[in-house]
Image: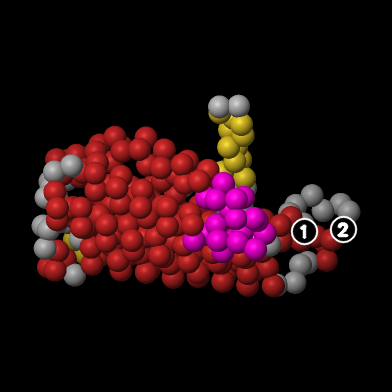
Amino acid sequence: MCEIAGVKLDARLTLFITLVSTFMVCLVVGDLIGGKVTSFHLFGREWPFSAGQLAFPVTFILTDILNEFYGRSIVRRITLLAFIMVGLTFLIVYAAGAMPWAEMTRGGTWDGITPREFDLVFTQATQIQLSSMAAFLVANFVDISVFSILKRATGNRMLWLRATGSTAISQLIDTIVISALVWGRKLTFEQYVSVVMTSYLIKLAVAIVITPLLYVLHSVIEKGFGIAPTPLDDKAAS
């Protein structure tokens, strides 16, 4: 048991704070770096994807872990709080962008961040950022619901099924929503379908690859921290 300023935190609460903090950081950082498009070559073609995919797979894992050990009601509240925190992040960023720059930053001898560089990185991707927030909120609620439905159907067995299944469905919705909001009027229907399928296949592949990590984290929490998964009826957790 951990004690901070006279307040005792048991293992379940300490773990909860750690998981939620990590979830929030990955979500915010994923949105901040999401404007960078990288790629890899496979099967004779280039597969572009957002650098935000470095952070978002962690949020997939943590959504399922929080659902597993703290219940659907709790993870729904975390999702709403995360949505608000991302909004707060971008309000602060845009408030900073609206502030005037010091005159010394406009001179030719200034070797720090310039107004143009700041705007390119932080304030010129508003549509992508807002679209990402909307897609996250919709997809995460779908993920939570599908995970809970599969858990009720399988009990505490087949963690891979409810984790990968919920992610597969929610990330398809996430990809469809964000691609429509960002690219809907800029692409033909065929191009839109191509973007959706490429992005989704990458997300699905990542979800499958990280499934062993989910089992490792599940085992550490259950055996290392001595915390059991939330019962199927998680009303008590709400």
Give 135 or 189, whichever is nearer the viewer: 189
Magenta span has 82? Answer: no
Q: Quadrant of residue 91?
A: bottom right
Q: How many marks?
A: 2
Give 180 or 160, whichever is nearer the viewer: 180
Q: Which mark is residue 107?
A: 2
Residue 92: give x, y in percent of width and height: 57, 69
Left or right side of 66 for 190:
right
Q: Disc 2 residue type?
A: Gly
Q: Is residue 224 above or below residue 189?
A: above
Q: Is residue 24 visible?
A: no
Residue 48: give x, y in percent of width and height: 59, 41
The secondary structure that most of the magenta stretch takes on is: helix
**Image quadrant in which the C terminus is located:** bottom left
| Secondary structure under the numbered disc 2 in the rendered image | loop
Left or right side of 223 for 125:
right
Which residue occupies 60% across, 61% down?
A: 184
Which residue occupies 79% across, 49% down?
A: 111
Which residue occupies 40% across, 65% down?
A: 138
Crowd tier of the residue under label 2, counting other residues whose Cα lies within 10 Å: few below 14, some 14–19, many 20 or above: few
Q: Which residue is mark 1?
A: 116
Q: Is residue 152 visible?
A: yes
Q: Which residues are magenta?
A: 177-196
